[in-house]
Image (spheres, rainbow, N blue to C red):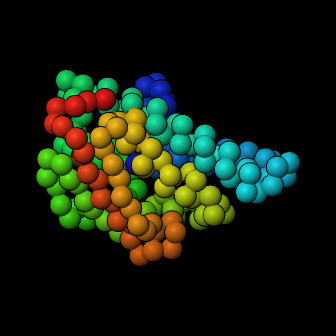
Amino acid sequence: MSDTTTSSVTTGADDIGILRQRAIEAAFAKELHAEMSAELGERKATEILARAVIRMARAAGAAWAEKAPGGQTSIQSFVDTLPAWTKDDALRIEVLKQTETEFAFNVTRCRYAETYKAMGIGHLGAALSCNRDGTFCEGYDPRLKLTRTQTIMGGAPHCDFRYSLEGSAGGGA
């Protein structure tokens, strides 16, 4: 559920939607991954790609935290970011629980996974998208933790996102 690394790029993603932004990134990543695979092997190329995406996700989380009301992150400020991720019917979600310290939902349709599969890079979907979610939290608020046991990208019928806000209230980024 993360965005790009700079506010100028974030604005662009907001304008075109994160799903479209991910498709643009994936087209570049596909070719870069193919070149790295030829030189380094598939496994090493995927590891490098995943590390770069994780670094981007952490920075994006920090950038989104700066947008939180008064610079104070919370479950509610996190929930308020959802329209960015669901824009263009990118994700269909079923909210199961929302309290001051927990937010749980299932993703029942993931157009990110569908897009990567259509591009012929479904095998890179976890590196390009799924691994962003937990590290986005690290940048957004280190107290925010994600537990997820399955993903559509990994072949499950739904993704199970379970966020919890640990530690004292009134933290922030």
Extreme residue toward the front, this view: 167
Q: Image height check: is 4 above or below 44?
A: above
What x and y, as percent, mark residue 76? 18, 43
Q: Image height check: is 49 above or below 15?
A: below
Q: Image height check: is 60 above or below 121?
A: above
Viewer-proximal residue among 113 and 72: 72
Quarter where residue 103 is shown: bottom left
Residue at the image position 30 percent from the left and 59 percent from the top: 162
Quarter where residue 161 is shown: bottom left
Q: Is residue 11 visible?
A: no
Viewer-proximal residue among 112 and 36: 36
What x and y, as percent, mark residue 15? 41, 36
Q: Is residue 165 visible?
A: yes
Residue at the image position 36 percent from the left and 58 percent from the top: 147
In the drawing, does residue 95 fall left or right of residue 40? Answer: left
Residue at the image position 65 percent from the left and 60 percent from the top: 121
What x and y, as percent, mark residue 163? 29, 53
For the C terminus, which image quadrant? Answer: top left
What x and y, as percent, mark residue 139? 40, 35
Residue at the image position 33 percent from the left and 49 percent from the top: 145
In the drawing, does residue 128 fall left or right of residue 109? Answer: right
Q: Image height check: is 131 above or below 66?
A: below
Please state the total of marks drawn on the protein image: 0
In the drawing, does residue 105 fall left or right of residue 149? Answer: left
